[in-house]
């Protein structure tokens, strides 16, 4: 008992020592700022002694620290109805108000600070205090653990459900393809991943790298729905038109995401991958988790439980030091994007898309704000001992859409993602249970000039021309559907994609043309069933030949009265789906597995009247996106359909040697099997029970 009591008193003494050190450093910082900033003083106009000034600074620093610790969390609670990004800006003004109050309460000398100066002083002091506390806590495992937990702002459970049962963390690096990951390891951009793979001198691998093949719809909505809920049936693209509902479904719109999640649960017959003590962070879908934050399927406009989607932002910004650090990184990232895009424009790099307007802020949100908040939430889940955590980091995907999948812009993002993996690995060492870290991606990205840039018209223009309808003289840009934009709208409490909630055609015969990367969908809203090739030819004889023979289009999928379904290509190529294995026809350039995913999509109830896949050049891996993206995904062709699965060697191999891991639903079954293995590993061996191999 004496040893236990002695250890307790040593921890108390250590904590007191750290607090005093932080107080002294904060006091010195305040004195330094008072000497530098003209609108900030710690003495009266008549002058004071050095002792009075020092006491004023010490009292002010101490009062500011106490107010930040006691009052700040209450202020955040009162501001739960404020949009999350607005809260991030209010942090600085509220922090300045706390500093002004601390100076006002000083009984020795109140001091004075202009409002704008108080904001600056408060930000600097918060950052210095945070850095000092972190540096001191790193030397003490218990203190380091407590600090990490406080940054994540999670209520820690005293004992996890099964302390001996390994937990599992699934970290999704959105859009990072298998080959891009290997290239980053070879360039020493991702040392953490390299260490896990055992590359380098004398390294012993702890993880195995497995590529897998996506469905035809190679995008986050289809892949993540299949991975988390075990079914992506009837998700033909990122966006599609449902005739019966007269509605455009968009995977990154909260209302659509909630509907897709409900359909997947009904189709699969279970709640999802994370139903047993799980947490879902930064995803489109919840996966059945009890703990959800920054999840789009619950980010509706209504108040109540749906507000949990933004709870991760409030948890993160409840520490003002987080806001200061993230805001500085946010500003630096905006400047970095402006500099990179300006350099690309002056060098006349090709291909290139517009990166102006609000894009620098969207990029900074994805690469800084969302990354920091999601990583902090995962840290809290680890320290709370949750059984399964699935988190999505969208930074690379957002940058690659506008800068291309490979290059200096995306390499910087990969470096920062690797540092996030290293931090999560470090936190896992302090968790109350062992953790297995699985890293995976939902799709890759294929490079290439946009369809509009290459040919001077959009897919919609080409369809209208084939239908004999007027075509605008100037091709309009197609809206880009990157996931980060939806996350920004959700954080601002504007989650609905403007203009896409319902489609009300002005002319009944005009087609609805939608783009999902290099996959296009054409639907005729006045015909309630899926039209056949024969019906389309009767209505618009030139449409299918116009599309199939265009050099920017690889193949079409249409329903056929004679064959059930056919693939159309240039020069009159027409191959029934049942014959694709013997004669791939237009699919030959797209490689093995293309016929399988096309046939599967053909069975979906909401497949469009005409499914259009862009041209693909196997020599350079390029496609032509129907959206304004020079790094795209969503259809067939190239690296977009080849993501990866990086798993610990302690887990069973994803597939048998020589087999292919194909489709997001198969990935779900693999992850589900690994969770079961972890559960069995934590159970005590029963007498006489034989474990299955």
Image: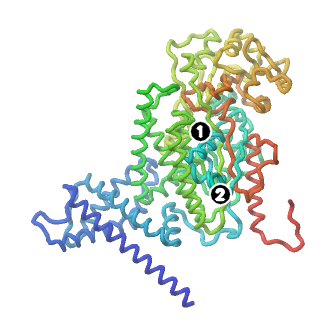
* Residue drawn at the location 40% of the way across and 50% of the way down: 327
* Residue drawn at the location 41% of the way across and 47% of the way down: 86
Left or right, 74 with respect to 161, comes to left
Whether pointer 2 and pointer 1 mark residues with C-beta atoms closer than 8 Å, the reply is: no
Residue 388 appears in the picture as rendered: no
User: Which sits earlier in the primary sequence, circle 2 or circle 1?
Assistant: 2
Counting every numbered tag in the picture gives 2
* Closer to the camera in the image, 123 or 339: 339
How has the structure been colored for display? rainbow
* Residue drawn at the location 52% of the way across and 26% of the way down: 351
* Closer to the camera in the image, 282 or 308: 282
Describe the element under mark 1 as helix, strand or loop.
Answer: loop
Residue 408 appears in the picture as rendered: yes
Counting from the top left corner in percent of width and height, residue 335 is at 39, 40
Real-space CA distance between mark 2 and mark 1, rounded to the nearest whole angstrom: 44 Å
Question: Between tags 2 and 1, which lies in front?
Answer: 2
**For residue 252, which numbered disc appears in the image?**
1
The quadrant in which the C terminus is found is bottom right
* Closer to the camera in the image, 97 or 168: 168
Query: Which residue matches tag 2?
Result: 202
- Asked if 345 appears above or below 320 in the picture, the reply is above
Q: Write down the quadrant of residue 382 in the picture.
A: bottom right
């Amino acid at each position: 008992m004496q040893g236990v009591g002695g250890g307790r008193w040593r921890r108390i003494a250590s904590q007191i020592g750290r607090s005093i050190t932080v107080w002294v450093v904060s006091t010195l910082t305040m004195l330094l700022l008072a000497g530098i900033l003209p609108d900030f003083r710690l003495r009266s106009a008549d002058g004071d002694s050095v002792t009075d000034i020092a006491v004023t600074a010490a009292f002010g620093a101490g009062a500011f620290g106490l107010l930040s610790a006691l009052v700040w969390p209450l202020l955040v609670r009162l501001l739960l109805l404020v949009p999350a990004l607005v809260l991030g800006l209010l942090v600085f003004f509220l922090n300045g108000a706390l500093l002004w109050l601390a100076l006002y309460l000083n009984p020795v000398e109140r001091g004075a600070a202009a409002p704008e100066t108080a904001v600056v002083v408060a930000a600097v002091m918060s950052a210095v205090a945070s850095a000092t506390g972190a540096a001191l806590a790193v030397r003490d495992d218990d203190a380091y653990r407590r600090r990490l937990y406080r940054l994540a702002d999670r209520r820690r459970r005293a004992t996890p459900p099964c302390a001996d049962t390994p937990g599992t963390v699934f970290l999704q690096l959105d859009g990072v393809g298998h080959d891009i990951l290997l290239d980053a390891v070879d360039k020493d951009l991702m040392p953490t991943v390299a260490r896990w793979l055992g590359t380098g001198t004398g390294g012993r691998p702890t993880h195995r790298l497995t590529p897998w093949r996506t469905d035809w719809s190679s995008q986050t909505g289809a892949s993540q729905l299949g991975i988390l809920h075990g079914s992506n049936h009837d998700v033909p693209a990122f966006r599609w038109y449902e005739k019966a509902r007269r509605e455009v479904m968009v995977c990154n719109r909260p209302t659509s995401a909630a509907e897709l999640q409900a359909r997947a649960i009904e189709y699969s017959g279970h709640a999802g991958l994370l139903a047993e003590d799980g947490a879902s962070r930064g995803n489109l879908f919840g996966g059945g988790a009890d703990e959800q934050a920054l999840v789009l399927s619950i980010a509706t406009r209504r108040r109540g439980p749906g507000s949990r989607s933004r709870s991760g932002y409030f948890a993160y910004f409840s520490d003002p030091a987080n806001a200061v650090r993230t805001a500085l990184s946010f500003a630096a990232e905006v400047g970095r994007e402006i500099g990179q895009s300006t350099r690309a424009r002056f060098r006349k790099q090709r291909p290139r898309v517009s990166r102006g307007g609000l894009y620098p802020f969207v990029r900074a949100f994805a690469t800084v704000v969302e990354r920091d908040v999601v990583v902090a939430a995962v840290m809290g889940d680890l320290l709370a001992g949750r059984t399964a955590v699935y988190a999505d980091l969208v930074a690379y995907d957002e940058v690659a859409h506008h800068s291309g999948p490979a290059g200096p812009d995306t390499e910087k993002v990969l470096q920062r993602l690797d540092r996030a993996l290293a931090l999560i690995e470090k936190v896992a060492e302090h968790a109350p249970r062992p953790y297995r870290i699985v890293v995976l991606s939902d799709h890759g990205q294929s490079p290439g000039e946009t369809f509009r840039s290459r040919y001077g018209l959009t897919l919609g223009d080409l369809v209208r021309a084939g239908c004999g309808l007027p075509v605008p003289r100037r091709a309009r840009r197609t809206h880009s559907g990157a996931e980060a934009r939806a996350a920004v709208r959700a954080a601002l409490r504007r989650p609905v994609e403007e203009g896409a909630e319902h489609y009300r055609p002005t002319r009944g015969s005009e087609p609805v043309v939608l783009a999902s990367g290099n996959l296009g969908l054409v639907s005729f809203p006045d015909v309630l069933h899926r039209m056949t090739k024969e019906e389309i030819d009767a209505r618009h004889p030139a449409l299918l030949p116009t599309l199939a023979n265009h050099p920017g289009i690889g193949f079409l999928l249409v329903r056929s009265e004679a064959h059930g379904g056919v693939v159309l290509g240039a020069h009159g190529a027409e191959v029934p789906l049942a014959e694709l294995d013997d004669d791939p026809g237009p699919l030959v350039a797209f490689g093995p597995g293309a016929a399988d995913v096309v046939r599967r999509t053909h069975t979906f109830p909401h497949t469009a009247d005409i499914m259009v896949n862009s041209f693909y050049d196997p020599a350079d891996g390029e496609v032509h996106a129907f959206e304004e993206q020079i790094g795209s995904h969503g259809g067939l062709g190239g690296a977009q359909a080849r993501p990866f699965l990086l798993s610990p060697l302690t887990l069973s191999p994803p597939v048998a040697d020589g087999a292919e891991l194909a489709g997001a639903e198969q990935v779900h079954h693999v992850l589900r099997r690994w969770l079961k293995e972890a559960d069995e590993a934590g159970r005590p061996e029963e007498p006489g029970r034989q474990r299955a191999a």
